[in-house]
Image (cartoon, grey):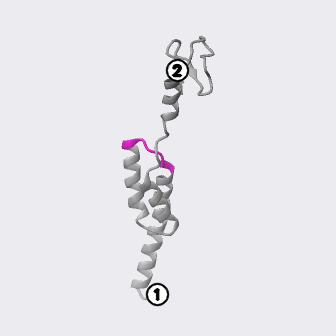
Amino acid sequence: MATCATCSGELRPEWRFCVFCGTAVTPTAVDEAAAEAPPRVNPIAIVALVLACVGGIPAIAFGHIALGQIRQTGERGRTMAIVATALGYPWLAVGVVLLLRFANGL
């Protein structure tokens, strides 16, 4: 949110005057608040979650890569990356079990 230049009170976009000190609100103060967009969602976290839902073992790698990027950039999507990574490990276990079963001739 924008803040009042005089009293540092938080300003809402619909206000024409600061309710705390009565100073007129400049349009730039309100525009600055509207211009602040939330951080975007990490696209690799989205890919990791999709891969984890369809049974992709690469979700583990994509999830770990996304977590590293999110830690560095502050993007959103940390929960998606964690869920994708957590779902990827059971798929890995299923893949190993199936590989061993077929390798031993059922």
Residue 106 covered by magenta stretch: no
Q: Residue at x 49, y 39 (%)?
A: 37
Gap in Å between the C-alphas at discs 2 and 1?
A: 75 Å
Q: Position of residue 51 (x, y in %)?
A: 47, 65
On screen, residue 10 versus residue 59, left or right, reads right
Residue on which the image places disc 1 = 106
Amino acid carrying mark 1 in the image: Leu
Q: Which mark is residue 96?
A: none
Q: Amino acid at mark 2?
A: Thr
Depicted 5 relative to depicted 84: above or below: above
Instruction: Pick the residue in front: 8 or 68.
Output: 8
Residue 64: horizontal and vertical position, in percent?
A: 39, 54
Q: Is residue 53 above or below residue 16?
A: below
Q: Secondary structure at mark 1?
A: loop
Q: Tell me, yes or no, whether the two marked residues, 2 and 1, touch with CB atoms within 8 Å.
A: no
**Front residue of 95 and 49:** 49
Q: Which residues are magenta?
A: 72-79
Residue 26's disc number:
2
Q: Which mark is first along the chain, 1 or 2?
A: 2
